[in-house]
Image: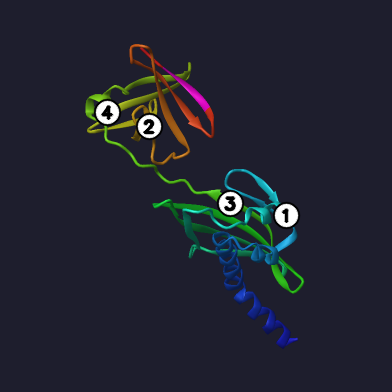
């Protein structure tokens, strides 16, 4: 009994290393276009939800693993934040980030993904049963607009009779926030598209009339808009 308990304890302590190695093997296989690794490590009833919102069965996911097209190369690394939570002896959930490094026809690109993998012990090994990938947000490049241009955005905007958003100059930059509350810095992604660095899912897309005067802006998040009209 003592020996069996020690064996189980040793296996449990080695599990994070085992699963992390398997997670790395899966993403290495994506870069190499080697579907045999996915075929070996995916459970027969596995599902994969990718960062675009598509959900693939095991067979559909295997079809996605193909060699990179000409002009594209790169690799994906499992981050050091890899951690697991177990449920009994046969289920483990891994949460971690992936860091992607890609060369796209000579241009260098990076991306970061938050991953959740559910692993189950089957047939003497650990198989991935469910995967969910989320593209981690990062701030886009910004541009510097002259103060006179920034001042053009300053004003009060209403999305309803009881909902007012105020944009104001604060030194050499803009701040914005609900009326009566402290404003937060706003940055320009391009002319007429502003964002708050702590709200990367949202873009403020300004609208102008035929004379070029700002009439309001759209708060756009995941393709849905909240319409703000400029107040006199």
Q: Nearer the viewer, mark 4 or mark 2?
A: 2
Q: Who's the residue at 53% across and 64% down the image?
A: 82
Q: Nearer the viewer, mark 1 or mark 4?
A: 1
Label 1–label 4 contact, CB within 8 A: no
Helix, strand or loop at label 2? It is strand
The answer to whether one can see residue 87 in this image is no
Helix, strand or loop at label 1? It is helix
Q: CA distance from mark 2 to mark 1?
A: 42 Å
Badge 2, how many Cα within 10 Å: few under 14, some, many 20+?
Answer: many
Quick one: quadrant of the C terminus?
Answer: top left
User: Looking at the rendering, which quadrant does residue 35 occupy?
Assistant: bottom right
Q: CA distance from mark 1 to mark 4?
A: 55 Å
Q: Who's the residue at 23% across and 28% down the image?
A: 147
Disc number for residue 194 = 2
Q: CA distance from mark 3 to mark 4?
A: 39 Å
Disc number for residue 178 = none
Q: Which residue is under mark 4?
A: 169
Along the polypeptide, which appears first: circle 2 or circle 1?
1
Q: Which residue is under mark 3?
A: 133
Front in this rendered view, residue 224 or 2: 224
User: Looking at the rendering, which quadrant does residue 231 occupy?
Assistant: top left
27 up-or-down from 138: above or below: below
- Give, as a single range, the part of the protein colored magenta: 225-229
Disc number for residue 59 = 1
Q: Nearer the viewer, mark 2 or mark 1?
A: 1
């Amino acid at each position: 009994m003592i020996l069996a308990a020690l064996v189980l304890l040793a296996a449990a302590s080695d599990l994070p290393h085992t699963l992390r190695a398997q997670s790395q093997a899966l993403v290495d296989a994506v870069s190499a276009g080697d579907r045999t690794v996915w075929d070996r490590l995916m459970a027969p009833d596995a599902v994969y939800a990718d960062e675009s919102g598509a959900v693939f069965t095991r067979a559909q996911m295997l079809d996605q693993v193909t060699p990179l097209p000409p002009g594209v190369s790169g690799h994906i690394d499992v981050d050091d934040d890899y951690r697991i939570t177990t449920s009994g002896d046969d289920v483990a959930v891994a949460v971690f980030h992936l860091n992607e490094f890609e060369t796209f026809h000579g241009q260098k690109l990076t991306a970061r993904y938050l991953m959740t993998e559910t692993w189950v012990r089957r047939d003497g090994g650990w198989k991935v049963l469910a995967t969910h990938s989320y593209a981690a947000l990062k701030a886009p490049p910004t541009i510097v607009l002259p103060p006179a241009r920034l001042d053009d955005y300053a004003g009060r905007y209403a999305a309803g009779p009881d909902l007012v958003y105020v944009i104001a100059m604060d030194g050499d930059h803009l701040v914005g926030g609900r009326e009566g509350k402290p404003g937060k810095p706003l940055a320009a992604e391009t002319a007429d598209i502003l964002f708050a660095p702590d709200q990367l899912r949202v873009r403020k897309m300004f609208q102008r009339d035929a004379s070029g005067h700002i009439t309001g802006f759209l708060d756009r998040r995941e393709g849905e808009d909240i319409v703000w009209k400029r107040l006199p």
